[in-house]
Image: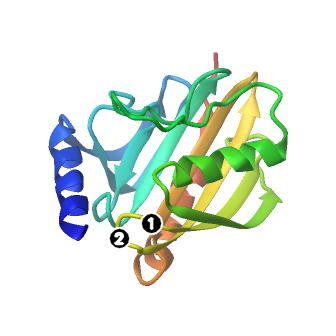
Amino acid sequence: MKRIACLVMALLLSACSSIVKMEGSQTINDRLTVNVPDAWNQLGAAGSYQPFALWTQEGVSLDQLRIWGGLASGEALLKVPAGGTAKPPVFSKGMSSEQLVALIESTYALDGSLVQVAKVQPQPFAGTASGLNVQFSVVRKEDEVHLEGQAWLMVEQDRLYLVAFTAPRLGFYPRLLPRAQAVVTSARLKPR
């Protein structure tokens, strides 16, 4: 099973067209800007396959910062590969806070991983007073690694803005969380 997981990860990495160093001011989906004080590595072109930008410090199996920059109502949070049978979670305008939290749970559980939400609290996000902070854990199905995660989200003008960070709870999460939080703290909606 671990060999299969490693093979899948290698295929995913080889499918990425490039690894780009992200630092300074960055714009996601032409709607959300962030300032990156500590460089991150972006895998592939933003939005090239998935509807989120995927950044990492140590490699995608060790940490992931996913940034959705304004999903419209009816858009899925993930794209399932051709032939896949899983139904990806879909954002809809008018979702309650509980439904938005369920989107995060189902996004990380889509592959069969076990997800548990630990805490949900209001928190300003992207320069607005509205927003949620969701703290959760994941037991990754492919290798049973225990991940800790946090997500920051808000809905503005019927679009979902979401940043989620996950990493193994021992070592990587406590060390890299401040870097993820620095990106989140800098997030601002791009003037339209």
Q: In the image as oriented, which residue stretches furthest toward the top?
A: 192
Residue at point 48%, 36% (across, down): 78
Q: Position of residue 156 (x, y in %)?
A: 75, 29
- Occupied quadrant, residue 167: bottom left
Q: CA distance from mark 2 to mark 1?
A: 6 Å
Q: Is residue 156 left or right of residue 141?
A: right
Residue 172 placed where, x, y %? 41, 76
| Element on which disc 2 rests | loop
Residue 190 in view of the camera: no
Instruction: Establish if 126 lies above or below 74.
Output: below
Task: Identify the residue at image location x=49%, y=56%.
Answer: 112
Give SS at disc 1: loop
Residue assigned mark 2: 143
* Of 33 and 85, the residue lying toward us: 85
Residue 64 picture location, percent across and down: 41, 56
Q: Quadrant of residue 141?
A: bottom left
For image coordinates 58% across by 52% down, the residue present is 184
Q: Quadrant of the C terminus?
A: top right
Residue on which disc 1 sits = 140
Query: Tag 2: residue type?
Result: Asp
Residue 105 seen from this side:
yes
Three-letter amino acid code of the residue under disc 1: Arg
Q: Position of residue 62 (x, y in %)?
A: 34, 67
Image marks 2 and 1: residues in contact by CB distance under 8 Å = yes
Quadrant that contains the N terminus: bottom left
